[in-house]
Amino acid sequence: MGNQRAYLWCIGPALILMFLILLLPIFIAAGMSFTNYSLGNTSADFVGLENYEQIFTRSTYAKMFGATFRYVFLVVPMTVGLGLGAALLINSLTRFGEVYKTIYFLPVMSALIAMAIVWEFAFHPTIGIINATLERGCGTFLEGWTWYAKGCARTFPLWLTDRDYAIWTVSFIGIWQGFGFNMVLYLAGLTGIPRDLYHAAEMDGTQSAWDRFCLVTWPMLGPTTVFVVTISFIRSFQVFDTVEAFYPQGGGPSKSVYVMMFAIYEKAIQQNLMGIGAAITMVFLGFVMILTLIQRWLVERRTHYA
Amino acid sequence: MLNGFSTRETVKHAVLILGAIIVLLPFYVMLTYSFKSPHEIMTNTGGIFGAQELFRDDYCIKRGNPVDACMVTPFIYNYVTAFSKAPLLRYLMNGLIVTGSIFVIQVVVALPCAYALAKLRFWGREAVFGLVLFCLLIPVHAIALPLYIMLAKLGLTNSYAALVIPWTISVFGIFLMRQFFMTVPDDLIDAARMDGMSEYSIIWNVMLPTAIPALMAFAIFSVVAHWNDYFWPRIVITGNRDLFTPPLGLREFKGDADGDNFGPMMASAVVIVMPLIVAFMLAQRRFIEGITLSGMK
């Protein structure tokens, strides 16, 4: 059977790199999170749980969790919902489905940092296309909407610098960027549903499209949904590009967009507080682990009846 | 359902078209601003392509040139400035070098490992595969901080190595290739062994060619992710413009943008985003396959 030791050469490099690049850093971060280490210092003091205590007591970090969860819980349901909606609509079209699919997928592969800069222009209070378009609607029936009338009377919102709007605007961009990805996964899931099931449902007396959806489509998309939701969570937890592009310092108006990845960057890289940065990293990894465990559990539970 | 022009079908198209307008809005803004003069951008005039009226380039005049020589067409001005004010070509080259080397190293590391996991019998194989599955859970961006410290200790920050090293191991690539190799019949490998081929040449001369479709999808997955990546380069490249990748270059451009530079900045955004979009248009199916590869888990 050839060279018996060949496998060592095959898996060796991969194993070493896996250990050095993926596993060792977790141990380093774990160790560092109990110290007040900064780069350039020769030594660091052991501070016990102080970093974690700060994360869970200080108001800055309360804002960090607030912003992260607000972002994640806006973006995940919206990208999943819109992704599913778009997939169902496109799938039911007799023609031009491909065109929409292409268009909706464009944001997924465009550099988010570039598109963030473009959005910043679009949302610009004076020269931006969005407020300019809104102003054009003034004096029409739209003024019946109090929010709109207020915008016309004074000015339309400073989308990115008003703390009441900032997190919504940043989330909107996250949704804009991410739903096409979920749409494609759902489209793949839809092609996997056997036609016979719909015929069978019809025989059983299912009439409306909604019934068909509840009875066949949605249950059959279960595994896809579990995957789509998990990957959407993990992706949106990692949001950074838009936040850094709009607010290079400080995380937005009143820290309302101070998401975790930006907090790690600010504390550790900008301020050289490695200990606290490492502690946030560990909390972050904890979230990712919990999400993945929930996913595994759901997948395993599902196999019993799917 | 049979009638292509039913009201129901029309409503669906209306909804999808509305969505398409919102999705395309920033692309429209990006393109149209890259054609316009500063005045047109400031006043929101000029339609889609701008009037393309000549305007005075103030930098040019400051350099002591006569006014006549400093009248420029907005479209040409924007794109020329994008390439001359910042070393945009250099950034694009860096992007190519970094994404290219990442992909090549990922394949060189992952392919043999995937082959061993799929086709060789050895003690501990299940454990190694279990480790691969575990590592799939670790988002590399999340452990950026300890990785940065390790690289800093080795004196490697601000180098191509720093941009490439964390991505050299793709557990996802290993997993994907292993799943693919499982479907390759053992007879093929046995025949190759009979012919006296070494394991090394089996990997590169027998297995690699069979894996081309999977590798293509993986290439797209890898290149798109690293061409667009902003977080990691932002951390390890500080100040040294020669090493900037396209996203970093664009960010720098934004940092010192004033009124006159909006057009050129949008032009650079177009230059950075377009290569992938054009490639996507040419090979749509493969792209969608590649980017949603992670859906195969």
Image (spheres, coloured by chain):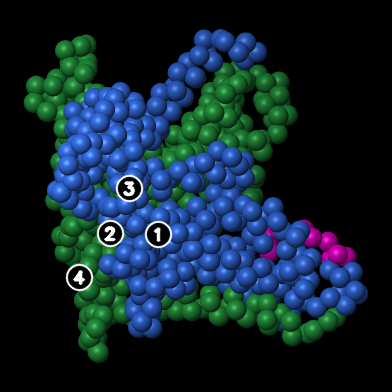
Chain colours: A green, B blue
- Looking at the rendered image, the disc whose residue lies closer to the viewer, 1 or 4, is 1
Camera-side residue: B160 or B225?
B160
- The answer to whether mark 1 and mark 2 are in CB contact below 8 A is no
The residue at the far bottom in this view is A42
Report whether residue B22 is seen: yes
Q: Please tell me whether the stretch drawn in magenta is mainly helix, strand or loop.
A: helix
* Chain containing the residue with disc 1: B
Camera-side residue: B74 or B63?
B63
Type of amino acid under label 1: Arg
* Disc 3: CA contacts within 10 A as few (<14), some (14-19) or many (>=20): many
- Give the residue pinned by disc 1: B90
> Do tags 1 and 3 sit on the same chain?
yes
- Looking at the rendered image, the disc whose residue lies closer to the viewer, 4 or 3, is 3
Type of amino acid under label 4: Gln
- Give the residue pinned by disc 4: A271
* Chain containing the residue with disc 3: B
- Give the residue pinned by disc 3: B82
> Residue A270 vs residue B82: left or right?
left
Up-down relation of residue A282 to residue B60 (above or below): below
Can you tell which quarter of the image residue B56 is in?
Answer: top left
Query: Residue A148: percent from the left, percent from the top?
Result: 18, 22
Q: Is residue B181 magenta?
A: yes
Query: Residue at (32%, 48%) from the top-left corner?
Result: B82
Query: Residue B41: percent from the left, percent from the top?
Result: 23, 32
* Region of the chain picked out in magenta, as a range: B178-188
Quote the CA–CA distance across marks 3 and 2: 29 Å
> Do tags 4 and 3 sit on the same chain?
no
Query: Residue at (18%, 46%) from the top-left corner?
Result: B65
> Residue B250 vs residue A273: left or right?
right
Type of amino acid under label 3: Ala
> Residue A305 vs residue B167: left or right?
right
- Give the residue pinned by disc 2: A262
